[in-house]
Each structure stands twice: as C-alpha cells, then as structure tokens.
Image (cartoon, rainbow, N blue to C red):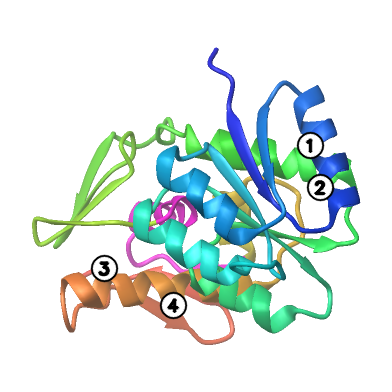
Amino acid sequence: MEEKCILIAEDEAGLRESMVYVLRKEGYQVVEYGDGLDAFSYIEKKMPDLILLDILMPGLDGLQLCARVRSLCATVPVMFISSKDEEFDRVLGLELGADDYLCKPFSLKEMVARVRALLRRSSYVGAHESLPRLEVGRVAIDAQQMFVWIDGELATFSLTEFRIIESLIKRPGVVKEREQLIFEVYNENFYLNDRAIDCHIKRIRKKIEQVAPGFQPIEAVYGVGYRWKKDF
C-alpha cells in the first residue's frame, strides 16, 4: 500500500517535531514547515494526502494557506490546529473549507486518530447501501469519484462537504439532526460542536448558488437540523 504523505505547517518547533515523530512512527511520510509560504511552495509542486495547519504562522497564516490550497484542490483533507481562544478563527477556517480542527493542547494519540479518520474518509467509495451514482431532481452525485453535478454542471466540494450532501440527498425530505450528521459524516466519537456542521452547510449553499443561482435544496429546520427538500 502506498505510503500516505502528510504535510505539517506549524511554527512551534517543539510541537511540530513531536507531531512528525509520532506520524512517521505510524508509517506516514511527513513533510514539515514552520512558515506558511514555504509550505505552499511545496503544495504547489506536489499535493500531499492530508494537510495539518496551524492558524498563526509567519509568511502565510493557516487561514490564508487553506484558501490557497482550496483554490488548487477541493478534496484534499485539511485539519486546523488552533488554540482554544481562537473560536472565531476556527469557525472561519471551516467556512474556508477545512474538514476538521484540533484544539491546543491536544494529545498526540487524538491527533493520530483524527488523521486516520480523515484519510479513511478520503478513500471512501460510498456506503454499501447506496449506488455509486445517485440522482435526485436537479442533482446527481457519484460516491466513488466524489463528483456532484447540478443541472449537468460539475460542482466541486471538499471531502466533508460531499459527505454532508450525500447524507442528506440519500433521504430527501427526512430531517437530519446536527448530531446525526456529525456521526454520519465523521463516523468517529470526536467532539464537534453544532457550529461545525452549520459552517459546512453555509459553504455548501454558497457553492450551489454559484453553479445554480436561486437553487437551494438544503433546508434548515429550526432547532433540529437540516433536510434535502423532497421536491428539488
């Protein structure tokens, strides 16, 4: 099996060295940078299989780097590393297209578990009960290739965004609670607050609007969660 490449962009040398050591011990290829610009120079030449980004870095900060990464690739998993008092930045990071985040201080064991989960999701080929291609109204999805077509036009979504769309569209008209979406999308016992799902939904809606103005098939159910409109 091909060795997965993980890029770490973290300017705190001691933490970065510990992260690199543990991930290499787990069998991953790891490249490390303490500067956002240097990290992006590598990414432009070779896209890693997963990216870990600190928010506060010299050169380019994590938010700027995430935006540049997403301009190159919509599907590579991105996980933010942030301090607990940076709630606003974490939310903004999710809105920019990050898939997950770790709050400092964190255990290296949890980091490895989240990395494994993201890499498993990135190699996801669709749930057993669903066909590789599913069409509902104006939208078609291909679970094997993570493609979404709206009115026949291909739209690009991140790994997490795709999983949310798939979860909702498989059961149009059925309300999915935020906690249920977190479980189905992440499929791990990690704590994520409801704001994470809301951020991803906001980004999905924005991307749908760009492809099909006025078309909004995801409906919020106040105090509960979201559903894919049955007649869309």
The residue wearing badge 1 is 20
Label 3 sits on a secondary structure element that is loop
Q: Is residue 213 left or right of residue 107?
A: left
The residue shown at (46%, 69%) is: 175
Which kind of residue does numbered mark 2 sit on?
Arg
- In this view, the residue in front, 131 or 64, is 64
Residue count near mark 4 (Cα–Cα under 10 Å), binned few <14, some 14–19, many ≥20:
some
Q: Is residue 171 visible?
A: no
> In the rendered image, which quarter contains the C terminus?
bottom left
The residue shown at (45%, 50%) is: 159
The relative height of residue 15 versus residue 17 in the rendered view (above or below) is below
The residue wearing badge 4 is 202
The residue shown at (42%, 40%) is: 45
Residue count near mark 1 (Cα–Cα under 10 Å), binned few <14, some 14–19, many ≥20:
some
Task: State if disc 2 and disc 1 touch (CB < 8 Å).
Answer: yes
Q: Which residues are magenta?
A: 158-178
The relative height of residue 222 versus residue 14 in the rendered view (above or below) is below
Separation of residues labelled 1 and 3 (CA atoms): 47 Å
Which numbered disc flags the more N-terminal residue, 2 or 3?
A: 2
The residue wearing badge 2 is 16
